[in-house]
Image (spheres, helix red, strand yellow):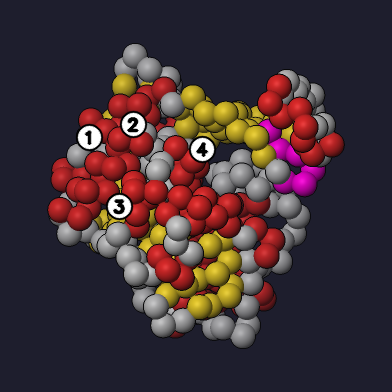
Amino acid sequence: MTILVSGSLAYDHIMDFQGHFQDHILPDKVHILNVSFLVNSLRKLRGGCAANIAYNLALLQERPLIVGTAGHDFEDYRKWLEQVGVDTSAIKIIPDEFTASCFITTDKSSNQITGFYPGAMNYAHNYDLAEYKDGAQITIISPNDPEAMVKHLHESRELEIPFIYDPGQQVIFMDGEALLDGIKGARAVIGNDYELGMIEKKTGKTPAQLLELTEMVIVTKGAYGSTIYTRGRTVEIPVAVEKAVVDPTGGGDAYRAGIIKGLLNGYSLEQMGRVAALAGTYCIENYGTQSHSFTAAEFAARYVENFADVPLPETERVAVS
């Protein structure tokens, strides 16, 4: 059985600014904004929403299949993903393009300013999910070439593959009609509190009202945990205690992997949210989106340390016995 992960593949260029953006942006001058931030570190790391989600699914003992496009500079990245258990056979290489690149500057309050060069991602809409429908349990439609997101959304419906809708950063470029089309019929809709705020502004619907169109709405709130809305219940999910907050980049993608794990394995909302929260915590304790790792036993033991009030499913508890 297969988890289809549709989304971006990219190299992340992560920079740290040892100050606060708000101290250097004058509200009455934003119409002529011209600001330069001197950063004290730069790292080029593997990233992209699809790869990040798939990497964390592999750590959680799943076997995801990435459906996306990359450039001629992707071979080492492909080998890395295969080594950790990600199926890369559906990744298409665009010979004349570079893999997409993301340029992220983070300040001391974990605020971020991001620039994104799509490169090979621009061609993602040329490829079909139908090639990989056999045995597909679920699809997550994460940030990607906007045309590919729409195409894979409609294909998921036509192929009757349950899908999770995760518009992410692309929510800025979508109008209310497009967002409602993506949400309609989704097994779940996921976004951070800013993204869900943008969805509410553009559609006029609160997370609770979106349940007219989808089974579940999940709002992540950083250090304040997350909220899972369903038609019958609203569940507040706490965060796992972190050893250090090194870099927030990719924490949301790791969280999404935990949600997929829980949905596919019949976890309760409380279990699913906590598994997702812990996966996100592992990520933010390291620089980069794929620098963390854990075994099943390590993950289960740390889950028990953080969430003793909500036991792991029986199948996962075996790992700590």
C-alpha distance separating marks 1 and 3: 21 Å
User: Which of the pair 189/175 is nearer the observer?
Assistant: 175
C-alpha distance separating marks 3 and 4: 27 Å
Name the N-terminal-most of marks 3 and 2.
Answer: 2
Percent of width and height locating residue 155:
20, 48
Is residue 182 positioned above or below 207 on the image? above
Say which element carries label 3: helix
* Image quarter of the N terminus: bottom left
Q: Residue at x 52, y 35 (%)?
A: 46
Amino acid type of the residue that numbered disc 1 sits on in the rendered structure: Tyr
Q: Nearer the viewer, mark 3 or mark 4?
A: 3
Residue at mark 3: 181
Q: Nearer the viewer, mark 1 or mark 4?
A: 1
Is residue 104 positioned above or below 261 on the image? above
Name the N-terminal-most of marks 4 and 2.
Answer: 4
Residue at mark 1: 127
Say which element carries label 2: strand
Residue at mark 2: 69
Q: Residue at x 33, y 31 (%)?
A: 69
Say which element carries label 4: strand
The part of the chain drawn in magenta is: 105-110
Percent of width and height locating residue 153:
27, 49
Q: Residue at x 53, y 77 (%)?
A: 235
Name the N-terminal-most of marks 1 and 2.
Answer: 2
Mark 4 is surrounded, within 10 Å at the Cα level, by few (under 14), some (14 to 19) or many (20 or more) other residues, namely: many
Mark 3 is surrounded, within 10 Å at the Cα level, by few (under 14), some (14 to 19) or many (20 or more) other residues, namely: some
